[in-house]
Amino acid sequence: MDTLLKSSQVVLYGLNQYETSSKGLRLSTTRWDFLSSVTDELYDEGYWNIGYTICNAILKLFPEDDEFLFKVEIFRDRLTASKLKDRMDVRPRTNKSEVDLDEEEYARLCRRRELILSPSSNLKCYYAHKNRHLRHIAGYKVEEVSRSPMIRIYHDVLHDGEIELIKLFAFPLLTAAKVYDPNNEDSDISDSRISNNAWLLSPDDPNRVGQSEHQANLYRKLNQRMEDCTGLSKSGTEGLQVNNYGIGGHYLWHYDALYYVSWGTLAVALRHLVLYYNAHYDYYVNDRIATWMFYLNDVIEGGNTVFPRLNISVPPEKGAAVFWYNLLSTGENDHRTMHGGCPILQGTKWVTNMWISEFQQTFVKPCLPDRASTQQDSSLLRAWE
């Protein structure tokens, strides 16, 4: 049977939509037993990352449950021993030669000022509409930088007045930017990221305290613009993260996706299942399908956004935005989108990021399997055959 169909059956089973599999195997009728069985199989098959993630999500709903308190400890022990912890802003270092190569490419691209592309006759510029009525009259100006993976620049999508408002609201909130440290499971200041940042939260965010209605209106306007340009749902953004880089400020190569280990489509489906039951979802289970970044000023020297594995360098352009997908169509991390911000040599750099969450894009950009993920799914699905 097709792996995607099998994966769908497993998820439906978790939702108590049926009681038997295609082979007549009687399955438990409780979600609890399902999740317990899933985590057991994930442990046995060596999928400790997603097992740890699922256990943490369950404990957020049921913090006193002894079974999952025990399981999260054994998953943590396995991850510590294998050094496979994967979380926000953590760069996978599979071997020294790969790290050296990425560092070399990052440095090489940062030494160049102009836009660098891999030659392709298929790249083009055009006006984007995305079915917004007014944009059929005056579309957004789009420049393709890469098609695989998809990276685009949207020119003149931010007005001077909006730029000044973003800076005005963010400036009093700026603090030293932090990077997630897997050793102590917390964020801390790091030499890999030299900048100051601030969050302008969504009007619907319960943590939004002391932010004015003017800020809320600006957020709604920029969020809508992202949706108009990309077609992705505006309900799936984390907020506006405003970043300011001074002389020497930079952000070394990293991923925006929160999970870099290849899990397969079934594992992604299981992560979505946990997310479905967790009303207060967070970055433990809801990955960043895409990144939208506004450039708030021109930089005199330096500050390009570079993609070392694609030989692409994008210079900051006031009023423009760069957009790319962090995840493959399977829902897994696209390692090609590793990127970094080059050091500022002269002047300053202001950008604001929108990270777009995958769960809210389920019907806008659904996950699809590929051959490699299908093979990985098979090892997990044997447990249900």
Image: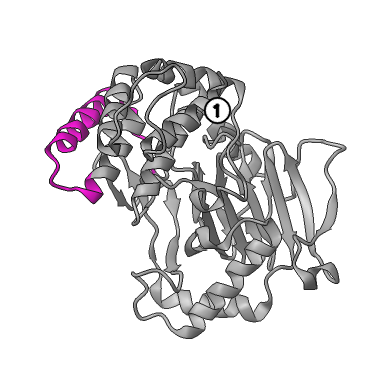
Left or right placement of residue 118 versus residue 254 in this view: right
Left or right of 148, for residue 291: left
Amino acid carrying label 1: it is Leu
Q: Is residue 201 visible?
A: yes
Quarter of the figure with residue 91 = top left
Give the percent coordinates (x, y) of residue 239.
Answer: 47, 64
Magenta stretch bounds: 59-87
Q: Position of residue 255 (x, y in %)?
A: 50, 42
Task: Tell me which residue sits at (61%, 36%) in the image.
Answer: 329
Q: Secondary structure at mark 1?
A: helix
Residue 112 is at least partly visible in this image: no
- Residue at the disc numbered 1: 4
Residue drawn at x 72%, y 55% as measured from the top left: 153
Q: Is residue 234 above or below residue 250?
A: below
Which of the image's four quarters has the N terminus?
top right
Q: Quadrant of residue 366?
A: top right
